[in-house]
Structure formats: C-alpha cells, structure tokens
Image: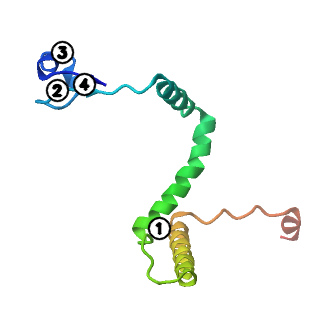
Amino acid sequence: MARFTKGQCQPCPDRPRCTSSRESARNVGFPPRELRDLQVRVRAEQQTPAWKARYAARSGVEGTINEFAHGHRMRHCRYRGQPKAHLQHVFTAIAVNIERLSSLASIEKPPPSRPSTAFQTFRD
C-alpha cells in the first residue's frame, strides 16, 4: 500500500488522472506479484474469440436469471414447501416463455414461401 499525504498529492500534475477527490490524499494498493500476473493473463485471455464465445452462453443464462429475480420477483417464494415452490417456478417459467413467444411473433416476418417443386410446376 502506498500512501500519499495531502501535501504530496495536491501539487502533482497527474492528480486529475489519479483521483477525482479534491481534498483528500491518495492511497494506492498494489496486489502481490502472483495475483497481478494472474490478472494480466486472464484479462488477455478475455479478449480472445474463444473466450467470448464461451462467455456468451453464460451471459444469456445470467440475463434470464436476472429477469426472473427482478422482473418476476422470484427471490421470494409465495408458497411454503418445496412442491408448491417448484410449481410456482414452473408456472412462472411457462408464463415467461409465452411472453417471449408472443413478442417474438409480432417482430418477425413470416418465412418466405417455398419455391414450387418440379411436379407443381408441371401440374400448373
């Protein structure tokens, strides 16, 4: 940990890039070398397309969990007992799926009709 007094911190020309505080001094923490090396390696790995593809699935799942927890108040169960709580979760999931499907149908265009087969062309 590095601590700078107010007298050391105030006249520094790089102060606006370092802290947004106008009055207090600055304390800077430095992680151990092993942790810093791990952070550098993991942050570099997070920029690869393979990592982003793996994380995309997790991101979708976390979004769904967040929707249930906040949008449908699933942090607290309405009923007591595991069978009733499970039934509430199942019904909520069904309702969310119906809601998603109903909003999806109005946005997408119907699929284009298939081209005529050789037999239909011959018959016409």
From the image, state whether disc 2 or disc 3 is nearer to you: 2
Circle 1 residue: 68
Give the camera-side residue of 116 and 48.
48
Which quarter of the rendering shows the N terminus?
Answer: top left
Where is residue 111, by image quadrant? Answer: bottom right
Circle 4 residue: 18
Of the numbered discs 4 and 2, the one sitting upstream in the chain is: 4
The residue type indicated by label 2 comes to Ala
The residue type indicated by label 4 comes to Cys
From the image, state whether disc 4 or disc 2 is nearer to you: 2
The x and y percentages for residue 118 are 87, 62
The residue type indicated by label 1 comes to Phe
Which quarter of the rendering shows the C terminus?
Answer: bottom right
How far apart marks 1 and 2 lie (CA) works out to 43 Å
Placement of 115 over or under 96, stated as above or below: above
Placement of 2 over or under 103, stated as above or below: above
Q: Residue at x 55, y 80 (%)?
A: 82
Dot 4: element:
helix
Give the camera-side residue of 37 and 55.
37
Give the camera-side residue of 53 and 34.
34
Circle 3 residue: 13
Give the camera-side residue of 64 and 124.
64
How far apart marks 1 and 3 lie (CA) works out to 49 Å
The x and y percentages for residue 28 are 29, 26
Circle 2 residue: 25
Q: How dense is the environment of label 1, judged by Cα within 10 Å: few (below 14), some, or many (20 and up)? A: some
The x and y percentages for residue 55 are 57, 45
Contact check, label 4 and label 2, Cβ < 8 Å = no
